[in-house]
Image (cartoon, helix red, strand yellow):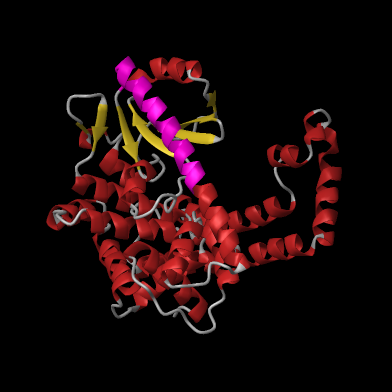
Amino acid sequence: MINEQQRGVLLLVRSALTGNKEQLPTDFNLEEAYTEALKQQIVPLLYYGAMNCDVSGDLPIMEQMLLTTAKAISICESQEQVRDEICRCFESAGIDYVLLKGSVLQSLYPEAGMRLMSDIDILIRMEQYPRILALMTKMGFARGAETDHELPWQKHGVHIELHKSLIPSYNKDFYAYYGTGWQFAKPVAGNHRYDFSDEDQMVYLFSHFAKHYRDMGIGVKHFADLYVYRREKPGLDEDYIRRELKKLSLEKFYAHVLQTLAVWFDGAASTEATDMITAIVLTSGAYGDSRNSFYSNLIKNTASPEECKKACRHRKLELVFLPYRDMCVKFPILKKVPVLLPFMWVARGAGSLFVSNKFRKMRRTMKSLKPECVEGYQESLHLVGLDYHFEDQY
Protein backbone atom coordinates (compact mmCIF):
# COMPACT_ATOMS: atom_id res chain seq x y z
CA MET A 1 0.00 0.00 0.00
CA ILE A 2 1.17 3.55 -0.69
CA ASN A 3 1.78 5.96 2.19
CA GLU A 4 0.07 9.34 2.67
CA GLN A 5 2.98 11.25 1.14
CA GLN A 6 2.80 9.18 -2.03
CA ARG A 7 -0.99 9.52 -2.09
CA GLY A 8 -0.59 13.28 -1.95
CA VAL A 9 1.72 13.22 -5.00
CA LEU A 10 -0.83 11.18 -6.97
CA LEU A 11 -3.63 13.55 -5.92
CA LEU A 12 -1.65 16.53 -7.23
CA VAL A 13 -0.97 14.72 -10.52
CA ARG A 14 -4.67 13.88 -10.80
CA SER A 15 -5.64 17.47 -10.09
CA ALA A 16 -3.23 18.78 -12.72
CA LEU A 17 -4.64 16.47 -15.40
CA THR A 18 -8.34 16.74 -14.52
CA GLY A 19 -8.52 20.34 -13.25
CA ASN A 20 -10.37 19.18 -10.15
CA LYS A 21 -9.52 20.34 -6.65
CA GLU A 22 -8.32 17.53 -4.37
CA GLN A 23 -8.13 17.28 -0.59
CA LEU A 24 -4.50 16.63 0.30
CA PRO A 25 -3.48 14.52 3.31
CA THR A 26 -3.02 16.61 6.46
CA ASP A 27 0.63 15.60 6.91
CA PHE A 28 1.56 15.98 3.21
CA ASN A 29 4.96 17.65 2.77
CA LEU A 30 5.23 19.61 -0.47
CA GLU A 31 9.00 20.06 -0.15
CA GLU A 32 9.51 16.29 -0.01
CA ALA A 33 7.14 15.92 -2.94
CA TYR A 34 9.17 18.45 -4.94
CA THR A 35 12.39 16.46 -4.37
CA GLU A 36 10.69 13.29 -5.61
CA ALA A 37 9.09 15.14 -8.53
CA LEU A 38 12.52 16.24 -9.74
CA LYS A 39 13.54 12.57 -10.02
CA GLN A 40 10.27 11.75 -11.76
CA GLN A 41 10.40 14.80 -14.07
CA ILE A 42 6.88 15.82 -13.06
CA VAL A 43 7.42 19.14 -11.25
CA PRO A 44 5.08 21.03 -13.64
CA LEU A 45 2.33 18.50 -12.91
CA LEU A 46 2.77 19.03 -9.17
CA TYR A 47 2.86 22.80 -9.58
CA TYR A 48 -0.36 22.99 -11.61
CA GLY A 49 -1.97 20.48 -9.25
CA ALA A 50 -0.94 22.52 -6.21
CA MET A 51 -2.41 25.66 -7.78
CA ASN A 52 -5.68 23.82 -8.44
CA CYS A 53 -5.72 22.64 -4.82
CA ASP A 54 -5.28 26.21 -3.49
CA VAL A 55 -1.80 25.68 -2.07
CA SER A 56 -0.48 29.16 -1.30
CA GLY A 57 1.67 30.55 -4.10
CA ASP A 58 3.62 32.59 -1.53
CA LEU A 59 5.32 29.52 -0.08
CA PRO A 60 9.05 29.39 -0.94
CA ILE A 61 8.68 25.87 -2.33
CA MET A 62 5.88 27.06 -4.65
CA GLU A 63 8.16 29.78 -5.96
CA GLN A 64 10.81 27.15 -6.65
CA MET A 65 8.26 24.94 -8.39
CA LEU A 66 7.14 27.90 -10.50
CA LEU A 67 10.73 28.53 -11.61
CA THR A 68 11.19 24.85 -12.49
CA THR A 69 7.91 24.88 -14.42
CA ALA A 70 8.93 28.03 -16.32
CA LYS A 71 12.21 26.34 -17.23
CA ALA A 72 10.28 23.28 -18.43
CA ILE A 73 8.12 25.48 -20.67
CA SER A 74 11.25 27.09 -22.12
CA ILE A 75 12.84 23.69 -22.78
CA CYS A 76 9.65 22.46 -24.49
CA GLU A 77 9.63 25.56 -26.72
CA SER A 78 13.28 24.99 -27.69
CA GLN A 79 12.54 21.34 -28.47
CA GLU A 80 9.54 22.33 -30.56
CA GLN A 81 11.61 24.79 -32.61
CA VAL A 82 14.32 22.21 -33.28
CA ARG A 83 11.76 19.51 -34.10
CA ASP A 84 9.96 21.83 -36.55
CA GLU A 85 13.28 22.75 -38.19
CA ILE A 86 14.05 19.06 -38.78
CA CYS A 87 10.56 18.36 -40.11
CA ARG A 88 10.75 21.26 -42.57
CA CYS A 89 14.16 20.11 -43.77
CA PHE A 90 13.02 16.49 -44.15
CA GLU A 91 9.91 17.57 -46.06
CA SER A 92 11.84 19.73 -48.52
CA ALA A 93 14.44 16.99 -49.04
CA GLY A 94 11.88 14.23 -49.52
CA ILE A 95 12.84 12.35 -46.34
CA ASP A 96 10.16 10.12 -44.77
CA TYR A 97 9.73 10.32 -41.00
CA VAL A 98 7.41 9.52 -38.09
CA LEU A 99 7.30 11.62 -34.90
CA LEU A 100 7.25 9.38 -31.82
CA LYS A 101 6.38 9.42 -28.12
CA GLY A 102 6.73 12.85 -26.53
CA SER A 103 6.24 14.74 -29.78
CA VAL A 104 2.87 13.03 -30.13
CA LEU A 105 1.89 13.43 -26.49
CA GLN A 106 2.97 16.96 -25.52
CA SER A 107 0.12 18.78 -27.24
CA LEU A 108 -2.48 16.52 -25.56
CA TYR A 109 -1.65 17.80 -22.06
CA PRO A 110 -3.78 20.60 -20.55
CA GLU A 111 -0.92 23.08 -19.98
CA ALA A 112 2.42 23.94 -21.57
CA GLY A 113 5.45 22.29 -20.01
CA MET A 114 3.50 19.52 -18.30
CA ARG A 115 5.14 16.84 -20.43
CA LEU A 116 8.93 17.10 -20.59
CA MET A 117 10.89 15.16 -23.20
CA SER A 118 14.41 13.91 -22.59
CA ASP A 119 14.89 13.91 -26.36
CA ILE A 120 12.99 14.15 -29.64
CA ASP A 121 12.29 10.71 -31.13
CA ILE A 122 11.86 10.35 -34.90
CA LEU A 123 11.57 7.12 -36.90
CA ILE A 124 13.47 7.19 -40.21
CA ARG A 125 14.14 4.83 -43.10
CA MET A 126 17.71 3.59 -42.89
CA GLU A 127 18.08 3.53 -46.68
CA GLN A 128 17.69 7.33 -46.53
CA TYR A 129 20.24 7.81 -43.76
CA PRO A 130 23.19 8.85 -45.96
CA ARG A 131 21.11 11.84 -47.09
CA ILE A 132 19.86 12.47 -43.55
CA LEU A 133 23.42 12.45 -42.21
CA ALA A 134 24.40 15.20 -44.67
CA LEU A 135 21.28 17.23 -43.83
CA MET A 136 21.75 17.01 -40.07
CA THR A 137 25.39 18.05 -40.39
CA LYS A 138 24.42 20.98 -42.62
CA MET A 139 21.86 22.14 -40.05
CA GLY A 140 24.57 22.24 -37.39
CA PHE A 141 23.71 19.11 -35.42
CA ALA A 142 26.50 17.18 -33.67
CA ARG A 143 26.52 13.41 -34.14
CA GLY A 144 26.49 11.04 -31.16
CA ALA A 145 27.40 7.37 -30.73
CA GLU A 146 25.10 4.96 -32.58
CA THR A 147 23.20 2.40 -30.49
CA ASP A 148 21.25 -0.75 -31.34
CA HIS A 149 18.20 1.12 -32.61
CA GLU A 150 19.01 4.85 -32.38
CA LEU A 151 21.19 7.45 -34.06
CA PRO A 152 21.71 10.33 -31.59
CA TRP A 153 22.23 13.97 -32.56
CA GLN A 154 22.38 17.20 -30.57
CA LYS A 155 22.03 20.95 -31.14
CA HIS A 156 21.77 23.82 -28.64
CA GLY A 157 21.30 21.34 -25.81
CA VAL A 158 18.38 19.61 -27.55
CA HIS A 159 18.85 15.86 -28.05
CA ILE A 160 17.50 14.05 -31.10
CA GLU A 161 17.10 10.28 -31.38
CA LEU A 162 16.66 9.13 -34.97
CA HIS A 163 15.19 5.64 -34.67
CA LYS A 164 16.30 2.82 -36.93
CA SER A 165 13.46 0.78 -35.41
CA LEU A 166 10.72 1.29 -32.86
CA ILE A 167 12.04 -1.31 -30.41
CA PRO A 168 15.62 -2.48 -29.70
CA SER A 169 16.44 -5.82 -31.29
CA TYR A 170 17.55 -7.21 -27.90
CA ASN A 171 13.90 -7.00 -26.77
CA LYS A 172 13.39 -10.05 -28.96
CA ASP A 173 9.71 -10.68 -28.30
CA PHE A 174 8.58 -7.10 -28.99
CA TYR A 175 11.02 -6.67 -31.89
CA ALA A 176 9.59 -9.77 -33.56
CA TYR A 177 6.23 -7.96 -33.72
CA TYR A 178 7.53 -4.55 -34.85
CA GLY A 179 10.67 -5.00 -36.91
CA THR A 180 11.43 -1.45 -38.03
CA GLY A 181 7.80 -0.44 -37.48
CA TRP A 182 7.28 1.16 -40.87
CA GLN A 183 4.52 -1.30 -41.78
CA PHE A 184 2.25 0.53 -39.32
CA ALA A 185 2.95 4.04 -40.70
CA LYS A 186 0.60 5.87 -43.05
CA PRO A 187 1.43 9.09 -44.97
CA VAL A 188 -0.18 12.33 -43.76
CA ALA A 189 -1.97 14.15 -46.60
CA GLY A 190 0.53 12.90 -49.15
CA ASN A 191 3.51 14.51 -47.41
CA HIS A 192 6.71 12.84 -46.23
CA ARG A 193 5.48 12.84 -42.64
CA TYR A 194 3.89 9.55 -41.60
CA ASP A 195 1.75 8.75 -38.56
CA PHE A 196 0.29 5.67 -36.92
CA SER A 197 -3.43 5.19 -36.50
CA ASP A 198 -4.70 6.15 -33.06
CA GLU A 199 -4.97 2.47 -32.16
CA ASP A 200 -1.49 1.53 -33.41
CA GLN A 201 -0.15 4.57 -31.59
CA MET A 202 -1.72 3.28 -28.38
CA VAL A 203 -0.27 -0.19 -28.93
CA TYR A 204 3.17 1.32 -29.50
CA LEU A 205 2.96 3.66 -26.50
CA PHE A 206 1.96 0.73 -24.32
CA SER A 207 4.57 -1.71 -25.65
CA HIS A 208 7.23 0.99 -25.13
CA PHE A 209 5.84 1.53 -21.62
CA ALA A 210 6.01 -2.23 -20.97
CA LYS A 211 9.57 -2.42 -22.32
CA HIS A 212 10.74 0.24 -19.86
CA TYR A 213 8.75 -1.22 -16.96
CA ARG A 214 10.16 -4.68 -17.57
CA ASP A 215 13.75 -3.69 -18.32
CA MET A 216 14.36 -1.05 -15.67
CA GLY A 217 11.17 0.34 -14.19
CA ILE A 218 9.22 3.42 -15.21
CA GLY A 219 8.03 6.68 -13.70
CA VAL A 220 4.83 8.59 -13.06
CA LYS A 221 5.02 10.69 -16.23
CA HIS A 222 4.66 7.61 -18.45
CA PHE A 223 1.55 6.60 -16.51
CA ALA A 224 0.23 10.11 -17.05
CA ASP A 225 0.93 9.65 -20.79
CA LEU A 226 -1.36 6.62 -20.98
CA TYR A 227 -4.12 8.38 -19.05
CA VAL A 228 -3.94 11.55 -21.17
CA TYR A 229 -3.75 9.69 -24.48
CA ARG A 230 -6.74 7.49 -23.71
CA ARG A 231 -8.75 10.48 -22.47
CA GLU A 232 -7.97 12.55 -25.57
CA LYS A 233 -8.73 9.64 -27.92
CA PRO A 234 -12.18 8.54 -26.68
CA GLY A 235 -13.09 6.56 -29.81
CA LEU A 236 -10.26 4.04 -29.63
CA ASP A 237 -11.06 0.56 -30.94
CA GLU A 238 -10.28 -1.38 -27.76
CA ASP A 239 -10.93 -4.74 -29.41
CA TYR A 240 -8.19 -4.06 -31.96
CA ILE A 241 -5.80 -2.80 -29.28
CA ARG A 242 -6.31 -5.90 -27.15
CA ARG A 243 -5.91 -8.23 -30.13
CA GLU A 244 -2.58 -6.64 -31.03
CA LEU A 245 -1.39 -6.60 -27.42
CA LYS A 246 -2.26 -10.28 -27.19
CA LYS A 247 0.20 -10.90 -30.04
CA LEU A 248 2.80 -9.17 -27.85
CA SER A 249 1.73 -11.21 -24.78
CA LEU A 250 0.81 -7.93 -23.09
CA GLU A 251 -2.94 -8.33 -22.69
CA LYS A 252 -2.77 -9.25 -18.97
CA PHE A 253 -0.37 -6.43 -18.16
CA TYR A 254 -2.61 -4.02 -20.10
CA ALA A 255 -5.61 -5.02 -17.99
CA HIS A 256 -3.65 -4.48 -14.77
CA VAL A 257 -2.35 -1.09 -15.94
CA LEU A 258 -5.86 0.06 -16.89
CA GLN A 259 -7.04 -0.98 -13.43
CA THR A 260 -4.13 0.95 -11.89
CA LEU A 261 -5.11 4.05 -13.89
CA ALA A 262 -8.65 3.62 -12.56
CA VAL A 263 -7.27 3.44 -9.01
CA TRP A 264 -5.18 6.58 -9.50
CA PHE A 265 -7.65 8.74 -11.39
CA ASP A 266 -11.14 7.33 -10.75
CA GLY A 267 -10.97 6.08 -7.16
CA ALA A 268 -11.35 2.40 -8.11
CA ALA A 269 -10.51 -0.39 -5.66
CA SER A 270 -6.89 -1.55 -5.68
CA THR A 271 -5.69 -5.14 -6.16
CA GLU A 272 -2.45 -6.95 -5.40
CA ALA A 273 -1.29 -6.27 -8.97
CA THR A 274 -2.20 -2.56 -8.92
CA ASP A 275 -0.46 -2.14 -5.57
CA MET A 276 2.66 -3.75 -7.03
CA ILE A 277 2.59 -1.54 -10.14
CA THR A 278 2.03 1.61 -8.07
CA ALA A 279 4.89 0.75 -5.73
CA ILE A 280 7.28 0.14 -8.67
CA VAL A 281 6.30 3.41 -10.36
CA LEU A 282 6.52 5.56 -7.23
CA THR A 283 9.91 4.19 -6.19
CA SER A 284 11.46 4.51 -9.65
CA GLY A 285 12.90 7.64 -11.15
CA ALA A 286 11.53 8.89 -14.46
CA TYR A 287 13.25 5.99 -16.21
CA GLY A 288 13.52 3.33 -13.53
CA ASP A 289 16.27 1.93 -11.35
CA SER A 290 19.72 0.70 -12.41
CA ARG A 291 19.43 -2.41 -10.22
CA ASN A 292 16.28 -3.41 -12.08
CA SER A 293 18.21 -3.06 -15.33
CA PHE A 294 20.81 -5.51 -14.01
CA TYR A 295 18.11 -7.97 -12.91
CA SER A 296 16.31 -7.83 -16.26
CA ASN A 297 19.54 -8.35 -18.20
CA LEU A 298 20.24 -11.47 -16.14
CA ILE A 299 16.74 -12.80 -16.77
CA LYS A 300 17.16 -12.23 -20.52
CA ASN A 301 20.71 -13.50 -20.87
CA THR A 302 21.42 -16.23 -18.31
CA ALA A 303 20.34 -19.78 -18.92
CA SER A 304 20.67 -21.16 -15.39
CA PRO A 305 20.72 -20.12 -11.73
CA GLU A 306 24.46 -20.92 -11.60
CA GLU A 307 25.16 -18.47 -14.43
CA CYS A 308 23.08 -15.94 -12.53
CA LYS A 309 25.29 -16.37 -9.42
CA LYS A 310 28.44 -15.87 -11.49
CA ALA A 311 27.00 -12.75 -13.09
CA CYS A 312 26.12 -11.31 -9.67
CA ARG A 313 29.67 -11.91 -8.42
CA HIS A 314 31.12 -10.33 -11.55
CA ARG A 315 28.89 -7.24 -11.20
CA LYS A 316 29.94 -6.78 -7.57
CA LEU A 317 33.58 -6.79 -8.64
CA GLU A 318 32.78 -4.22 -11.31
CA LEU A 319 31.21 -1.93 -8.70
CA VAL A 320 34.44 -1.96 -6.73
CA PHE A 321 36.85 -2.16 -9.68
CA LEU A 322 35.23 -0.14 -12.45
CA PRO A 323 36.20 -1.18 -15.99
CA TYR A 324 39.02 0.78 -17.61
CA ARG A 325 36.67 2.71 -19.91
CA ASP A 326 34.58 3.99 -17.00
CA MET A 327 37.65 4.78 -14.93
CA CYS A 328 38.98 6.94 -17.78
CA VAL A 329 35.89 9.12 -17.45
CA LYS A 330 36.60 9.68 -13.76
CA PHE A 331 40.39 9.87 -14.14
CA PRO A 332 41.28 11.19 -17.63
CA ILE A 333 45.01 10.74 -16.94
CA LEU A 334 44.49 6.99 -17.47
CA LYS A 335 44.06 7.59 -21.21
CA LYS A 336 47.73 8.66 -21.29
CA VAL A 337 49.06 6.47 -18.48
CA PRO A 338 46.94 3.27 -18.29
CA VAL A 339 49.41 1.57 -15.92
CA LEU A 340 48.05 3.83 -13.18
CA LEU A 341 44.73 1.94 -13.22
CA PRO A 342 45.35 -0.09 -9.99
CA PHE A 343 46.33 3.08 -8.12
CA MET A 344 43.20 4.88 -9.37
CA TRP A 345 41.06 1.99 -8.13
CA VAL A 346 42.58 2.51 -4.68
CA ALA A 347 42.04 6.27 -4.93
CA ARG A 348 38.40 5.79 -5.95
CA GLY A 349 37.80 3.34 -3.10
CA ALA A 350 39.38 5.67 -0.56
CA GLY A 351 37.32 8.55 -1.89
CA SER A 352 34.12 6.56 -1.51
CA LEU A 353 34.96 5.83 2.13
CA PHE A 354 35.22 9.54 2.86
CA VAL A 355 32.00 10.36 0.99
CA SER A 356 29.68 8.38 3.24
CA ASN A 357 26.51 8.70 1.15
CA LYS A 358 28.30 7.38 -1.93
CA PHE A 359 29.80 4.50 0.06
CA ARG A 360 26.44 3.59 1.61
CA LYS A 361 24.80 3.61 -1.81
CA MET A 362 27.49 1.27 -3.16
CA ARG A 363 27.02 -1.10 -0.22
CA ARG A 364 23.23 -1.14 -0.68
CA THR A 365 23.65 -1.89 -4.37
CA MET A 366 26.09 -4.72 -3.69
CA LYS A 367 23.76 -6.28 -1.10
CA SER A 368 20.92 -6.23 -3.63
CA LEU A 369 22.90 -8.12 -6.29
CA LYS A 370 21.85 -11.61 -5.27
CA PRO A 371 20.24 -14.40 -7.31
CA GLU A 372 17.23 -14.33 -4.97
CA CYS A 373 16.77 -10.62 -5.80
CA VAL A 374 16.72 -11.51 -9.49
CA GLU A 375 14.13 -14.22 -8.82
CA GLY A 376 12.08 -11.73 -6.78
CA TYR A 377 12.15 -9.24 -9.64
CA GLN A 378 11.03 -11.93 -12.07
CA GLU A 379 8.20 -12.91 -9.75
CA SER A 380 7.07 -9.28 -9.44
CA LEU A 381 6.89 -9.07 -13.24
CA HIS A 382 4.96 -12.33 -13.44
CA LEU A 383 2.43 -11.05 -10.89
CA VAL A 384 1.46 -8.17 -13.18
CA GLY A 385 1.46 -10.30 -16.35
CA LEU A 386 4.77 -9.12 -17.79
CA ASP A 387 7.03 -12.09 -18.43
CA TYR A 388 9.97 -12.25 -20.82
CA HIS A 389 9.08 -14.47 -23.75
CA PHE A 390 12.67 -15.22 -24.77
CA GLU A 391 14.13 -18.60 -25.61
CA ASP A 392 16.09 -20.47 -22.97
CA GLN A 393 15.15 -18.21 -20.07
CA TYR A 394 15.09 -19.97 -16.73
Residue 19 visible somewhere in the drawing: yes
Vertical relation: 172 (above or below) 13:
above
Q: Nearer the viewer, residue 329 or 305?
A: 329
Residue at 50% of width from left, 55% of height from top?
41
The overriding secondary structure of the stretch rendered in magenta is helix
Vertical relation: 85 (above or below) 345:
above
Most extreme residue toward the bottom is 26
- Magenta stretch? 73-95
Most extreme residue toward the front is 58
Residue at 79% of width from left, 64% of height from top?
356
Vertical relation: 224 (above or below) 338:
below
Vertical relation: 168 (above or below) 295:
above
Residue 223 rendering spot, x and y as whole percentages: 37, 60
Residue at 32% of width from left, 74% of height from top?
263
Residue 134 rendering spot, x and y as whole percentages: 45, 15
**41 relative position to 347: left or right:** left
Residue at 40% of width from left, 68% of height from top?
277
Indicate the quadrant containing the C terminus: top left, top right, bottom left or bottom right. Answer: bottom left
Residue 138 rendering spot, x and y as whole percentages: 48, 15
Indicate the quadrant containing the N terminus: top left, top right, bottom left or bottom right. Answer: bottom left
